[in-house]
Amino acid sequence: QVQLVESGGGLVQAGGSLSLSCAASTSGSIYRINDMGWYRQAPGKQREWVATITRGSRTNYADSVKGRSTISRDNAKNMVYLQMNSLKPEDTAVYYCNADLDSVRRYWGQGTQVTVSS
């Protein structure tokens, strides 16, 4: 099992920055987390992908956040981070981190609220 806990959300004015963190704890025979990433879900909308980082730190971003966000990770600590700059009201959402053990085993955190005021 993998448990994920996000932190760092909050209220910020448009143009501001926030840094999200996600701590993963593993149990049982799990010894390695592969891809980690972030998704978000705005009110009344489906959850959408934001960014992914591989264990080797290769990154990919959704066009909506590319150039404004940076995903990073610390494998030794099982942590993943999302630095978001130049925030817009449309970035308002609950942000969820995910951890993938393989192509079928994906775990989610409980989410952290990010609200961007105009």
Image: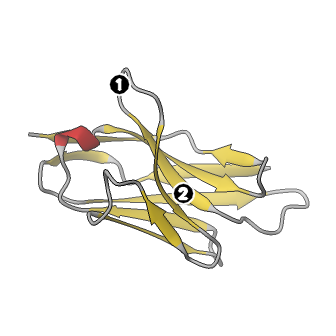
Q: Residue at x 78, y 68 (%)?
A: 32
Picture quarter containing residue 63? Answer: bottom left
Does the CB distance between marks 2 and 1 fall below 8 Å? no
Residue that mark 1 sits on: 43
Give the numbered dot on residue 63: none
The residue depicted at 52 percent of the width and 57 percent of the height is 22
Farthest right residue? 29
The front one of 88 and 59 is: 59
Task: Place residue 45 in its image quadrant.
Answer: top left
Residue type at the position of mark 2: Gly
Q: How crowded is mark 1: few (under 14 residues within 10 Å), some or many (20 or more)?
A: few
Residue 62 x, y percent position in the rendering: 40, 54
Left or right: residue 23 versus residue 105 is left
Q: Name the residue under label 2.
A: 37
Image coords of residue 50 (percent x, y): 43, 51
Q: Residue at image x 26%, y 63%?
A: 68
Q: Horizontal placement of 37 versus 43: left or right?
A: right
**Label 1 element class:** loop
Q: Which of 75 and 59 is in front in this view?
A: 59
Q: Quadrant of the C terminus?
A: top left
Which residue occupies the extreme left position in the image?
A: 118
Q: Where is residue 77 in the image (x, y as percent from the top left)?
A: 62, 73
Amino acid type assigned to the residue bearing label 1 in the image: Pro
In three-dimensional space, the C-alpha distance between marks 2 and 1, rounded to whole angstroms, equals: 20 Å
